[in-house]
Image: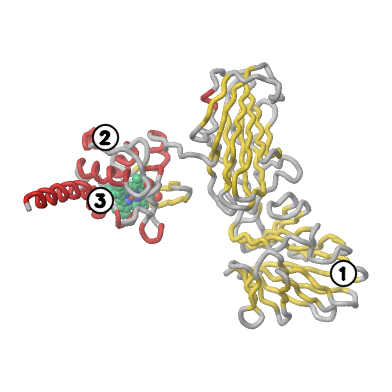
Amino acid sequence: MIYRSLFSLCALTASAFAQDGGQLFTQHCSACHGTDGKGATGGAFPPLAGSAWVAGDADRAIKIVLHGLHGPINVAGKTYNLAMPPQGAVIPDDHIAAILTFVRSSWENQASAVNADLVKSIRAATSDRNTPWTAEEILKLHPLPFEKTALSSLISRVYQGPWSAIPDFAPLKPISVEEEHDGIISLSDSPFKESFAMVWEGTFEAPSAGDYTFLLDADDAATVTINNKPCLKIGGTGPMNGTRARRGTMTLPAGTHPFRVEYLQIKGNQGIALGWKAPASNSWKWLTDKTAPPREPIPIEAADGRPAIYRNFIAGSTARAIGFGFPGGFNISYSADNLATELVWTGKFMDGALHWVERGNGKEPPAGENVVNLSKSRALPAAAKFRGYKLDPTGNPTFSVQVGSQTLLDSWQANAVGLTRKLSISGSGKAMKILISDRLATKATTGHEYALGDKLLVTTDGAALETTEGKTTLNLDPAKPVTLTYRWK
Ligand code: HEC
């Protein structure tokens, strides 16, 4: 009996102590950050679980709790632009310490306990602060700790020599070789300031299959090779200020890929920044300890009610792609190789700030959202030939394709909710079977509406779409033009 009550007393004391921070968290923080730390109201507020902001140096989180935070902030790859009110006046030092100790050791967070004396000294040192912090201010004082990157088994080698271009490293002997367990590419391992080169080799872990965008900037020269294929290259001498930055896209299956970076510092300043974006993601992740804010985008967009045209490589489409960005934010990429509109998307059209590296490698991804990949093979038989496009008085295109003695006319324009496509055949003769999609499951919904994949609805003005063996086609009769409308769910 005595043993039992003693035991339960101990258990009670221990749990009361451990709960302290948790209870205070519920009282002061969970309304906004969620009881599970994932951000209240379905993630409208930023998470504390898995947040780099609460990891590492505790000063950052202490100052945020004391004085609040406002303005744009990136947490775990997502951007917020909200305001957290200061809590310093209502929560005493030892409670702030208990809350942050709880936050830093809960969920998947693993950071050290916070001592009330530290909170006290920070409160005293910042007593004249009477406005909330901005992310920029507080990160200048307390940069975020680095998280492990997508590179593993990373090895760095340092070489020395008076090179003016990246040398062939095969016959050279490195001065030092190091394993980089954090997967971070950094020049801090070089003992030299000038006339040196570095090579990093490891594997890049692609979380999903699709088009990956890479961004490289360097002072002076650098190259990136993925799967033994050149991806990006900056030559010569020059600064790392975005003017020489290179961007490129590579289609990668999910899984690990051999990854190699070569760097040459000739003289003067040094630096390398290498970032990547996952398919359909809009946030950059960095493989280097330096980041290069991508150069100010130069949006290419419709103007004066006329669509914008983009004649350069578009990621997700073939080499001869023609992009049209219609007013209202509906966009297409038409492939002159496959005689098909291969991509449609909403929002921003294309970013013109970039430089393309090598044919076929450097492809610019659509700048907007809801990208739908419609097809990847030819829309018409092999004998069909692309004959160019004409613009109507408002700039909307009609692509024309010659099939024997007939010409297929394929016109696109925006409507209030999406895109209108008119298909007709000039010249009499046989009906044509036109590929609409070979990448999306097609399901007839109601009337003449079809769901293509999970994002797009296509409605016909009466014609039926047919699906066989994963290919959705339209049978176009020369006597009966067809109008299709594309809209997003
Ligand atoms: C009234 C809502 C609210 C309360 C209460 C609140 N926060 Fe916040 N918190 C926010 C918002 C909103 C942001 C993001 C501010 C921005 O967008 O600049 C934020 C950001 C943060 C951040 C940095 C970003 C991140 O997600 O890691 C930390 C750390 C933080 N809060 C900790 C706390 C702690 C600890 C408490 C409790 C003592 C607390 N907050 C209470 C709304 C709140």
User: First in sequence: mark 2 or mark 3?
Assistant: 3
> How crowded is the residue under tag 1: few (<14 C-alpha within 10 Å), some, or many (20+)?
many
Quadrant position of residue 359: top right
Q: Is residue 97 above or below residue 43?
A: above
Q: Amino acid at mark 1?
A: Thr
Q: Residue at x 66, y 66 (%)?
A: 440
Q: Secondary structure at mark 1?
A: strand
Q: Nearer the viewer, residue 348 or 181?
A: 181
Expressed as whole percent of the image width and height from the top left, the position of residue 247 reads 65, 42
> Which residue has dot 1 on it?
407
Q: Quadrant of the C terminus?
A: bottom right
> How crowded is the residue under tag 2: few (<14 C-alpha within 10 Å), some, or many (20+)?
some
Q: Is residue 303 above or below residue 60?
A: below
User: First in sequence: mark 2 or mark 1?
Assistant: 2
The alpha-carbon separation of the residues under discs 3 and 1 comes to 71 Å
Expressed as whole percent of the image width and height from the top left, the position of residue 438 reads 71, 65
- Say whether marks 3 and 1 touch (CB < 8 Å): no
Quadrant position of residue 239: top right
> Which residue has dot 2 on it?
122
Q: Which label was assigned to residue 22?
A: 3
Q: Tell me if the residue at label 1 has its CB under 8 Å from ligand 1.
A: no
290 on left or right of 102:
right
Q: Amino acid at mark 2?
A: Ile
- Say whether marks 2 and 3 touch (CB < 8 Å): no
User: First in sequence: mark 3 or mark 1?
Assistant: 3
239 on left or right of 60:
right
Colouring method of the image: secondary structure
Q: Amino acid at mark 3?
A: Gly
147 on left or right of 405:
left
The alpha-carbon separation of the residues under discs 2 and 3 comes to 22 Å
